[in-house]
Image (cartoon, helix red, strand yellow):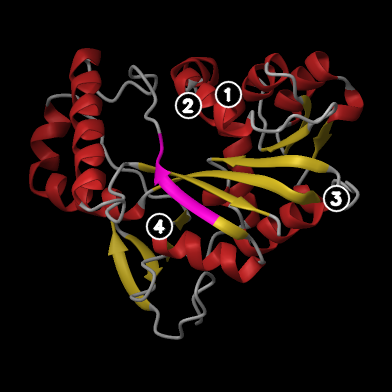
Amino acid sequence: MICPCCDSPRMQSVSIDNTVYRQCPQCRFLFQPFVTTARRESVAKHYESVDPHRQVAESKTAFFRHVLQHLDRFHAAEKRILDVGCGYGYFLEEAADHGWLPFGVDISSEAVKQSRGKFGDAGVFLGKLAGSGFESDRFDAVTFWDVLVFSQSPFTELAEGLRILKKGGFVGIRVRNVLFQKALYNLFAPFSSAAHRFGLKKPYVFHPNCFSPKSMHFLLKRVGFAGIYIENSPLTTGDPYGHSRAGSLTRLAKRLTDSFAKRMLQLSRGKWIWGPSLLIWAQKP
């Protein structure tokens, strides 16, 4: 099997929490090779009925404003943004307040229904990006916030994003940092039983696709993007997923983690990107 990010043929099998993954020793990409379409689509149902999406969106307010500051360099009379996996349109609301014409794509029918109530039927497509039918060179920015981790083919998804971007347009991506998640997994494993007794959830997250800074850089170059820039993503605030019974414990852990990640980035002069999540920017040449 060849690595989907860097084309390395030397994939290795690893087991995490009794789940089999394949890992690339060259770029550190980690993924589940056998994820059914039904399982991927169940994510949408979970988002509709279980996930505290409003609280999560509120916890991402600082992140939304951070990325929009980056994108505000566009000064066109009409600047269009497409949010892939737009959900209930929380990010698009913020983007509209910053002068963007908002468009979205999502596979959740309930989320799309509510987003269309905010932005109109023509502005939000129900389905996958590949089936949306958007013309080439249409958007100034395309965003993938926490969605490539579930994609059946991140390469195909990003290639479609490249096609519909205008020349010089930006793609924005947010994914969990597999380097941080694996380090946290190794640290937590000896204490997992005790943590469960105290009502603490697992602090690490592994999705079907788990990216490192290196794997994202390889993937974006393969797709055809230029000007690739990767940084630690601003953390969400609070404890919307209820990781601990005492929310203050989660908030403290996040502050310490954020300080550690910033310090490592500073000491390494931008080389050690050790935050829990990655924020990636790239341009269409």
Q: Is residue 241 left or right of residue 56?
A: left
| Marks 3 and 4, the one that precedes in the sequence | 3
* Amino acid type, mark 3: Asp
Q: CA distance from mark 3 to mark 1?
A: 36 Å
- Tell whether position 160 is magenta: no
* Amino acid type, mark 2: Phe
Q: CA distance from mark 2 to mark 1?
A: 24 Å
Residue depicted at 85% across the width and 26% down the height: 77
What range is drawn magenta here? 228-233
Q: CA distance from mark 3 to mark 4?
A: 27 Å
* Crowd class of label 4 (few under 14; some 14 to 19; many from 20; radius 10 Å): many
Residue depicted at 11% across the width and 39% down the height: 193
* Amino acid type, mark 4: Pro
The percent coordinates of residue 266 (x first, y second) are 23, 44
Q: Is residue 177 above or below residue 238?
A: below
Q: Nearer the viewer, mark 3 or mark 2?
A: 3
Q: Secondary structure at mark 1?
A: helix
Identify which residue, 245 or 285, lies in the foreground.
285
Residue annotated with mark 1: 49
Q: CA distance from mark 2 to mark 4?
A: 19 Å
Residue annotated with mark 4: 213
Q: CA distance from mark 3 to mark 2?
A: 27 Å
Name the main secondary structure of what is drawn in magenta.
strand
| Marks 2 and 4, the one that precedes in the sequence | 2
| Marks 3 and 1, the one that precedes in the sequence | 1
Q: Nearer the viewer, mark 3 or mark 1?
A: 3
Residue 61 visible somewhere in the drawing: yes
The percent coordinates of residue 121 (x first, y second) are 89, 24
Q: CA distance from mark 4 to mark 1?
A: 32 Å
Residue 137 marker: 3
The percent coordinates of residue 92 (x first, y second) are 69, 23
Residue 63 marker: 2
